[in-house]
Image (cartoon, helix red, strand yellow):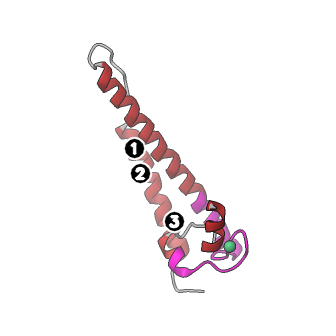
Amino acid sequence: MTNDDWPALLTAQRAQLIADLASAAEASAPVELDQSRVGRLSRMDAMQSQAMSQAADSRRHREIRQIDAALARVEAGTFGDCAKCDEPIAVSRLRFAPANPLCLDCAEELER
Ligand SMILES: [Zn+2]
């Protein structure tokens, strides 16, 4: 085990993601497509940026789910073990992304 405080790190990341979601929701709140005011091009711009912020939101939701799963592994005492092969995940990898459930080998295998 390491001295890194993974639960604190994970909880802080989770709080940041939730804050990001809240401010994103505020910023993009009503994408009202006022036909009289905006032309066709800016309407497409609005739709495009809406699609982009939806993509960012679903990425954040996915990360929050990953963090919740990682926190559950902390509780269960299995944090830091690969969810697939049970080998320990490299600490450098966890520092980069603490919620990451897979070791490098398994992650690369998934991408192949
Ligand atoms: Zn693995």
Q: Residues within 10 Å of mark 3 (few under 14, many from 20)?
A: some
Whether 31 is among the magenta residues is no
Q: Residue at x 69, y 79 (%)?
A: 87
Quickly name the residue at label 1.
Answer: 24
Residue 97: in sight, yes or no? yes
- Say what secondary structure mark 1 lies in: helix
Picture coordinates of residue 46 (x, y %)? Answer: 35, 30
Pick out the residue farthest to the left.
Answer: 37
Task: In the rendered view, tell whether residue 15 sits above or below residue 27.
Answer: below
- Say what secondary structure mark 3 lies in: helix
From the image, state whether disc 3 or disc 1 is nearer to you. Answer: 1
Q: Is residue 100 left or right of residue 23?
A: right
Amino acid type, label 1: Ala
Task: In the rendered view, tell whether residue 68 sits above or below residue 93.
Answer: above
Amino acid type, label 2: Asp
Determine which of the numbered discs, if any, sits on residue 20 in the image: 2
Quadrant for ligand 1? Answer: bottom right
Q: Which residues are magenta?
A: 66-93
Q: Is residue 99 left or right of residue 18?
A: right
Dots 2, 1 in contact, CB < 8 A: yes
Quickly name the residue at label 3.
Answer: 11
Label 3 to label 2, Cα distance in Å?
14 Å
Task: In the rendered view, tell whether residue 44 sits above or below residue 49.
Answer: above
